[in-house]
Amino acid sequence: MRHFQEELDKVQRRLLEMAGLVESAIHLSVRSLAGRDEEQAQGVLRYEAQVNQMQIEIDEIATHLLALHQPMAGDLRFLTAAIKINSDLERMGDLAVNIVERAVDLMRRPPVKPLIDIPKMAELTQSMVHKSLDAFVNHDAELARNVLVSDDAVDDMKDTIYQELIRFMESDPTTVAAAVDLIFVAHNLERIADHATNIAEDVLFLVKGVDVRHHAEARE
Amino acid sequence: MRHFQEELDKVQRRLLEMAGLVESAIHLSVRSLAGRDEEQAQGVLRYEAQVNQMQIEIDEIATHLLALHQPMAGDLRFLTAAIKINSDLERMGDLAVNIVERAVDLMRRPPVKPLIDIPKMAELTQSMVHKSLDAFVNHDAELARNVLVSDDAVDDMKDTIYQELIRFMESDPTTVAAAVDLIFVAHNLERIADHATNIAEDVLFLVKGVDVRHHAEARE
């Protein structure tokens, strides 16, 4: 069983590494957008390839552990949470790629406006990813709740960004194609934040045994 | 072990039921959009509540089976696939709700254009959900591949819809807010199709033992 515990620790370490790559991918995707830098966009694709590789690896280890050992209670909950977190992190990698696809498209168009809100939204989102994994590793329900609160802030930022961009399009039709790209960048950031929120909800379930999915009132 | 097999059958039946609810939700969301019918929009919310309930139930049964029995090889692969499919179906329910939120918003605005392409896209997406679950139940790799092919068709439809809506916005700025809503409807349908594709990929893995995720070339 010592070997089993070592394997569980390995899953946890790999998930932390993977989350680090995802954070870098988010950061670089928005830097490439703000700086109109195609080379940085390429860097995001490299991060995502690594994230995909890790997802398959972690999935294999976790499934193998479920099959070979008969984990009970806490260990079983840990492994099922790990499998879900793994999938959330992988999707965040995809969403960072969606952002750079928009960024590359935007490089070919005149800038709509100076980008201030989107980098701010990206920073908060990135910190949610970091905190959700910290909460997982440290069984920290307080920190997990903190992620849920940030998610509401991210949603508000997204609404503000949408409204501003719609006003831009209405007053100057030449901005339409670029503004739609920016709306999708904000949308992808919101979805990354949603995945961090999923992880925080899994952590609360793991720590407290409370299922907060589909129960907004329990999130207060 | 007979009891175990009965439980596995139950998981499969519940997933099929859940997929039926998801299909109804997609269908009704686009009907409510095309018919500007708020009552149908409410119906989608009721479907989604049922989908959420089933997701929690299926998750509990599957996790319980993993814990109590020590499923090997085929049964283990079946159960991990079931857990993933469960989560994909639940997200499709959320996406149908996203569509009706846009539909309700659109009811307050003058129509941009007659809706023909979006209902067509919805129909194909709905059939992908149906086929992906059929492929799962019947271990039908051929049908699963058929879903992957439809996904490319859905992507093309989405691109056509985007381009048309961007032209609308550019030529008539009063359509901007409504056209952005419609862009998101198409986007949500595309994401539902992506989840059906995830399921088809899981089926291929289950049947063939081949991991087609992250390997577009293997999907040909």
Image (tube, coloured by chain):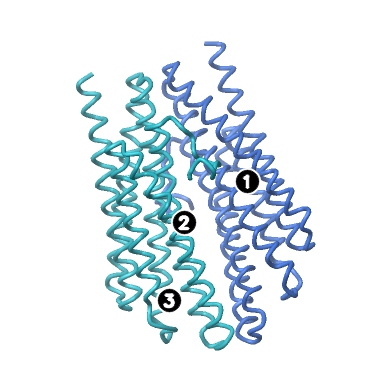
Chain colours: A blue, B cyan
Q: Chain of mark 1?
A: A
What's the amino acid at mark 1?
Val
SS for callout 3: helix
What's the amino acid at mark 3?
Asp
User: Residue at point 24% right, 47% down?
Assistant: B17
Residue B111 shown left or right of residue B69 in the figure? right
Q: Is label 1 in contact with label 3 (beta carbons under 8 Å)?
A: no
- Residue A154 x/y as whole percent: 60, 60
Label 3 sits on residue: B105
What's the amino acid at mark 2?
Asp
- Residue B198 x/y as whole percent: 44, 45
Residue B143 shown left or right of residue A107 in the figure? left
Q: From the viewer's perspective, is residue B47 above or below residue B206?
A: below
Q: Are marks 2 and 1 on the same chain?
A: no
Residue B10 shown left or right of residue A47 in the figure? left
Q: Residue B152 bears which disc, if any? A: 2
Q: From the viewer's perspective, is residue A161 above or below residue A58?
A: below
- Residue B144 x/y as whole percent: 37, 44
Q: Is label 2 in contact with label 1 (beta carbons under 8 Å)?
A: no
Label 2 – label 1 distance at C-alpha: 31 Å
Of badges 2 and 3, nearer the viewer stands 2
Label 1 sits on residue: A129
Picture quadrant of residue A155: bottom right
